[in-house]
Amino acid sequence: MSSENASCAAGTLYVVSAPSGAGKTTLCRGLLQQFPDLSLSVSYTSRPSRPGERDGHDYHFVSAACFERMIDEGAFVEWARVHDNYYGTSLAVLRQASAAGQDLLLEIDVQGAEQLRLAGLPLVSIFIAPPSLAELRRRLEGRASDSATVVALRLENARTEMAAAERYDYLIVNDTLAQAQLQLQAIVLAQRCRSPRVLAQWRKRWLQE
Ligand SMILES: Nc1ncnc2c1ncn2[C@@H]1O[C@H](COP(=O)(O)OP(=O)(O)OP(=O)(O)O)[C@@H](O)[C@H]1O
Ligand SMILES: Nc1nc2c(ncn2[C@@H]2O[C@H](COP(=O)(O)O)[C@@H](O)[C@H]2O)c(=O)[nH]1
């Protein structure tokens, strides 16, 4: 589903995907500071936490067995195996945000984004690309959060993930961080000016006068 019908009084669902290391988390953190009323969906994962990551803040860290139980219980609106681990978005969080008219930000991989499209959910999708594969390697190695084997797997997977870029509404090449941050901010600002959303808010005020 495209941004054409994603903006309404019910809140907007922003889906951000990128190959690992392209800078998605850095940019999304910046965006959350720029828009304090935008809320982040904290995913569930079976990946071990990295140093500095907090349970319930960066992810809900669960065992693979627990994640599989949650799949059976229908707890996820989408889930995927990414780089050999499970990741999924809570259906309850999505429903709560939708009921509250809250804008929600999902940082998910390309398989998860595709599941949401196939489910027919209205969303604004944004793909973050690295300027080059060499720079992606530098960022992954520079972050120093993953073993050499994990970095190699993520770089290998980046090739197929990049092929999905054409299915997104927006593409940001994260070369200079400040420029990419500005582009991401501009997408949200433009989305918030879309006529159905503004009309709904304006009518509410108009009727109250
Ligand atoms: N424009 C940029 N220029 C240089 N370094 C950057 C830029 N954007 C992000 N980085 C750095 O690249 C590294 C990877 O960024 P980040 O962790 O945000 O990537 P990610 O896409 O969220 O990766 P993952 O999916 O593995 O979590 C970090 O060390 C970050 O500081
Ligand atoms: N399909 C989903 N993918 C997710 C979700 N949460 C995160 N991710 C993606 O996984 C990879 C790896 O993340 P990392 O934190 O281990 O580096 C990355 O592409 C994330 O976007 C999710 O809920 N569903």
Image (cartoon, rainbow, N blue to C red):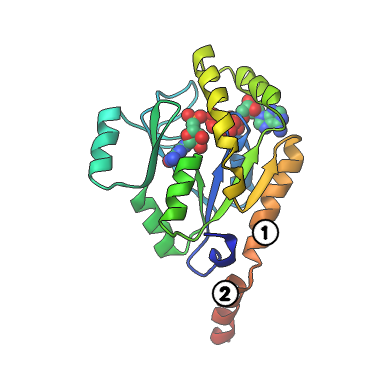
Q: Amino acid at mark 2?
A: Gln
Residue 123's place in the image compared with 28, above or below, is below
Say few, some or many: other residues with alpha carbon within 10 Å of mark 1 (under 14 / 14 to 19 / 20 or more).
few
- Label 1 near label 2: C-beta < 8 Å? no
Taking the spot 49% from the left edge, 39% from the top edge, the residue there is: 109
Disc 1: residue Cβ within 8 A of ligand 1's nearest atom: no
Residue 159's place in the image compared with 183, above or below, is above
Taking the spot 70% from the left edge, 54% from the top edge, the residue there is: 186
Depth order, front residue of 35/119:
119
* Residue labelled with disc 1: 189
Image quadrant where residue 193 sits: bottom right
Taking the spot 54% from the left edge, 18% from the top edge, the residue there is: 152
Q: Secondary structure at mark 2?
A: helix
Residue 101: give x, y in percent of width and height.
47, 64
Residue 97: give x, y in percent of width and height.
43, 58
* Residue labelled with disc 2: 201
Depth order, front residue of 173/93:
173
Image quadrant where residue 99 sits: bottom left
Tell which circle, 2 or 1, labels the residue nearer the N-terminal end: 1
Q: Secondary structure at mark 1?
A: helix
Residue at mark 2 to residue at mark 1: CA–CA distance: 15 Å
Residue 203: give x, y in percent of width and height.
57, 81
Say whether residue 120 is visible: yes
Residue placed furthest toward the top: 148
Say whether residue 108 is visible: no
Residue 58: give x, y in percent of width and height.
47, 35
